[in-house]
Amino acid sequence: MRPDEVTNMAHGNAAAGHGDHHRPPKGVMRWLTTTNHKDIGTMYLVFSLAMFLIGGVMALLIRAELFQPGLQLVDPGFYNQLTTVHALVMVFGAVMPATVGLANWMIPLQIGAADMALPRMNLFSFWLLFFAFVLLISTFFVPGGAPAAGWTLYPPLVLQTGNAFPMAIFAIHLMGASSIMGAINVIVTIVNMRAPGMTLLKMPLFSWSWLITAYLLIAVMPVFAGGVTMLLTDYYFHTSFFNAAGGGDPVLFQHVFWFFGHPEVYIMILPAFGIVSEIIPTFSRKPIFGYEAMVYAIASIAFLSFIVWAHHMFTVGMPLAGQLFFTLSTMLIAVPTGVKVFNWTTTMWRGSLSFEPPMLFALAFLFLFTIGGFSGLMLAIVPADFQYHDTYFVVAHFHYVLVPGAVFGIMAAVYYWLPKWTGHMYDMNIAKWHFWLTAIFVNVLFFPQHFLGLAGMQRRIPDYPTQFTDWNMVSSIGGFGFGLSQLLFVWLIIRCVKGGQRATAGVWDWPHGLEWTVPSPAPYHTFEKSPELH
Amino acid sequence: MAQDKQTGQYYFPHGSRLPFFGSASLFVLMAGAAATLNGASIGVWVLGVGFLLLCALFFFWFGEVIRENQAGALFYARQLSVPWLGGDGAKAVTGLLWPDFEASWPSNGPGALSPRDNGSYEIIPAFGLPAINTALLLTSGLTITIAHHAMKMGNRGMLKIFLALTFLLGFTFLGVQAHEYGEAYREHGLQLGTGIYGSTFFMLTGFHGLHVTVGAIMLVVIWLRCMKGHFTPHQHFAFEAVAWYWHFVDVVWLGLCRGSASSWQALHRDRRQYRRGQDRADAIPVPALRHQAVLRAKRPESLPRGLLR
Amino acid sequence: MSIVKRNSKLPAAAGALAALTTVPARADWSLLNMPKGVSELSRDIYDMHMIMLWICLAIAVVTFGAMIYAMIRFRKSRGAVADTKLLHNARLEAAWTIVPTIILIGMAIPSVDKLIKIEDMSGSKLTIKVTGYQWYWHYEYLGRGVSFYSRLARSSDLARQRGSGIDPNTVDNYLLEVDKPLVVPTGTKIRLLLTANDVIHAWWVPDFGMKRDAIPGFMNEMWVSVDADKPGTYRGKCAELCGADHGFMPIVVVAMPPAEFEAWLAQQELRQ
Ligand code: HEA
Ligand code: HEA
Ligand code: CUA
Ligand SMILES: [Cu+2]
């Protein structure tokens, strides 16, 4: 709804009854004790940025080692630790918390709620996450080093981990608990606390995407936690779940892992879909095309994501019927995803487009995610996957959907809502520089990996036959370019927090939604009295 | 946060130190557990401290929630739905992934782990003690329902008696289970390490037992709160929540029982097959074997053993 | 991976820009795509790969074309005015649900008969049991009493050590050479039984078009058949993370005409 459709706004002014909301305490105690959704959202976002830098530094170490054949910087064992922790940090530390941070900030603002439904639990889930990563990253310093079996943690290899083993597993338990709490919070908030008149089918698509993501999280995190617990008992308590000698099966873990792992990748991308669905209408100055189809598409993607997991395991030797089933179900996901891509395109059609930084990132998302989707489709075809599997073609695929997909979505969201958070406009020139450098280098970084994979370079190796040298060099150069470009992003955010031109409530030309009706920066408490919508 | 029916206002809890405190204590607990598993001698102490901190956390957290609740804030999460629960997909999945699956696996574990010399073990039948336990748990489901009715009728005497009966049944269940575990370990040669049957049996029933313990403790707390008169016939969400949990624990047990009964039958059947399979052990390279699933299921002997340790 | 090792003339530490600008010009196009390979299966797979690539490219041209057109045509700076009434179009939406579904099913169908062929192990003339170890392979010609281990060649092993001072570019078939290659007859359907002794490995020779996991405690099967007219040396590697030296357990297969192969096998039998 447009800002002028909203009446009866009450933010900031204390409401009756429990009106004694003091200002937050000063200093560090504010962050340790706050139950305010905006504070917690900020903490999530800052944490995520820090993790992105840490995971990125590991990625750059990987790329530096792969710059040329031969081992120059790290030992093979340490290389495996780097890839494993790089992936865990990026997935669980950077992308997921970023979307949770956005959910915390924006869902109450979008649906006209005063806060998240369960504020204390909200804070709990943040600090659990923090300590989970303290535990995980400290594994680098224990005997035997960090886990090195890949982020997929396949047994029996993962059972060769040193002292890091229980630490990593407990860290995963903490992350899981944190995610489940966060997800419950989102669901309870959206189900119970929408402003009067905000029916589900009027809800902004970002909130919708998160509602469905939250259900995915609740469904699969316990499965993952259960799987790693079985690893733990196999390691320490002589059980045989994944040990053939006792009647178990290592492949069982792969089924458990991917039953979690595949929905997990949609947990990372669905919020990005939601973000893009907010941004493209704003900068096309026209409402989203096919709103309901968008909602149904997210829901069907979520549903389908539960029945495709074994496409990660085509080479383990599944029966024919299984292989065909998983090929077909996987390919079906392209249909609702296609609906989304086409609806975004049609939203731009006969629009009035302008290209501010959020829109630039959203457009890059549109192109590059689709490329990643196409390579995913190729991977889904079984006989062909026999060749692609475990090569850099897969690495290229998932970085295309994750970096210019999920990460670009998050960056677009930051550029979109940063003025609302800080009350200042950021430097558009730096933002555009950041965009162009990032968009160019991300392709230099990941596109050649398609070639490497097709030509036969497997993933998870620190050293390679010499014919792969050239494209690896290109990719590494792209990686360093990409990494350096992110310094602009960090600098821009710091400057924008410190000051800048004041932002109006609407910020953009064609603001659309409740969040643009409150002043910028959004006051500490908003919507203490529900807004009324026509 | 909760909404006041009359004014449409929400109640905010104030800032709280508990979440940070809770996360930190879980961190201590897990670091301690990891250190213990890795054989560090201070591990147990850290673990103990973590556990105490966690207990303190529960105490404070629930205390605060109860205080707020008494002060009139209504907590609810009733609209949370879990539509994906229910539905038995297991069969379909097995059929798809391993159409020729026959459960003729070596299920007695990496031999040496059983206390018996030949590594054999007996399995826990679904009748006898387990049947008694099932009856105990089912009865407790009944008593808590009676207690709930009493609560709604305002009959506090009945409420207290039947609630107490419920957790007593729960603790008895746990006692019987502990006894059964002891027998399994000492007499049946069935341990956590005796192959996939032992692993599955103890993990499933053990985690269930853990939930029963938690549920029984929650019942005690609710009982104490009933004694203090915290609830009214119309306002007793905490009671209902615990009752749900208790029914959940109950239902899961029925599932486990059914599962273990059928696996008991399966095991008896499969052991015969397994023996048959042994006679064919040297037949590995026969090209007639069509399918890796068959290969896997039928030829355990070709396996290199003792892979993990 | 092709048989021929490509000699990189560029010193390993070439400057950033130099690499970027010279690579496309010097590119060896075989390094951009999947090898066609030397077996029926690998050619089948290559064909499927190319079909999908073209389909995806065609769809990309259409969708990206529409996006780019919209971005140029409907710019605010060109005075475009938004048509805020364009919210639904049932026909269009139905079309872009149904058409992709049909395309997808069309893409999936060719995989069915290929898969059936791949999973059909019947009619093999020779069975070789392949066992993965950390970090080498063991091959056993079942029923023929010949078996041996196959490890990374010494020259590569020396050069790959950190700080060895040996430039990998000077080593022949760096990381793709073993001490004792697997020898197979051409024009023969060979069944491989795959298993492992410690952790999961995967046996993969790109030119044969197949990859399958070797799982401790279980037997997996696959078959390969090298074209009768393509004897030669084919190289692959372990393709499942198996620990520190996962990158250093190559596979080398020498395919020779059946007669030569029988002679080789007889000689091996004598030796063992
Ligand atoms: C955000 C994360 C994300 C997303 C969104 C996806 C999306 C998809 N992925 Fe991907 N995937 C990963 C993350 C992701 N993936 C990761 C991390 C791995 C590796 C894990 C590991 O091993 O470590 C992986 C691995 C992986 C594999 C296993 C490869 C292997 O190991 O051998 C497969 C195989 O089927 C696959 C398929 C797909 C498909 C079909 C989609 C589809 O959802 C894509 C759908 C989108 C489109 C198709 C484009 C838009 C559509 C149109 C324009 C419509 C018209 C199109 C047609 C009709 C063709 N993925
Ligand atoms: C969301 C998830 C995510 C993200 C964002 C990324 C981001 C990146 N990834 Fe990652 N990656 C994974 C998920 C992700 N990755 C997963 C799941 C795997 C599989 C792991 C496995 O096999 O188990 C993987 C594996 C993986 C590999 C394969 C390793 C192997 O198989 O051997 C490589 C190699 O190039 C790689 C590279 C990169 C690079 C260069 C980036 C870049 O985008 C990172 C850019 C960010 C920065 C660089 C940080 C910001 C900048 C600074 C801190 C300033 C300092 C900079 C300089 C001094 C230059 N990743
Ligand atoms: Cu063996 Cu990788
Ligand atoms: Cu997947």
Image (tube, coloured by chain):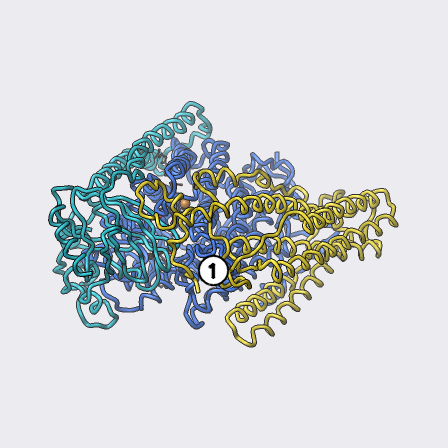
Q: Is residue C48 visible?
A: yes
Q: Position of residue A40 (x, y in %)?
A: 56, 57
Furthest-front residue in view?
A: B279
Look at mark 1 in the image and give the residue it sits on.
B110
Q: Position of residue B8 (x, y in %)?
A: 71, 43
Q: Quadrant of residue A29?
A: bottom right
Q: Is residue A285 above or below residue A60?
A: above
* Percent position of residue A11, x then y: 63, 49
Whether residue A491 can be seen here = no
Is residue C103 or residue B278 the one in the foreground? B278
Residue C65 in the image: above or below residue A264: above
Crowdedness near tag 1: few (<14), some (14–19) or many (≥20) residues, C-alpha within 10 Å: many
Image quarter hosting the C terminus of chain A: top right
| Colour that chain B carries in the picture | yellow
The colour chain A appears in is blue
Which residue in the rendered view is the most extreme toward the top?
C91
Frontmost residue, B164 versus A419: B164
Place of residue B49 in the rendered image (x, y in percent of width and height, measured from the top left) = 63, 71
Q: Residue furthest bottom?
A: B41
Chain shaded cyan:
C
Q: Quadrant of residue A90?
A: bottom left
Of the 4 image quadrants, the one containing the N terminus of chain A is top right
Say which quarter of the image contains residue A341: top left
The one nearer the camera, A515 or C270, is C270
**Amino acid type assigned to the residue bearing label 1 in the image:** Pro
Front position in the image: A241 or A228: A241
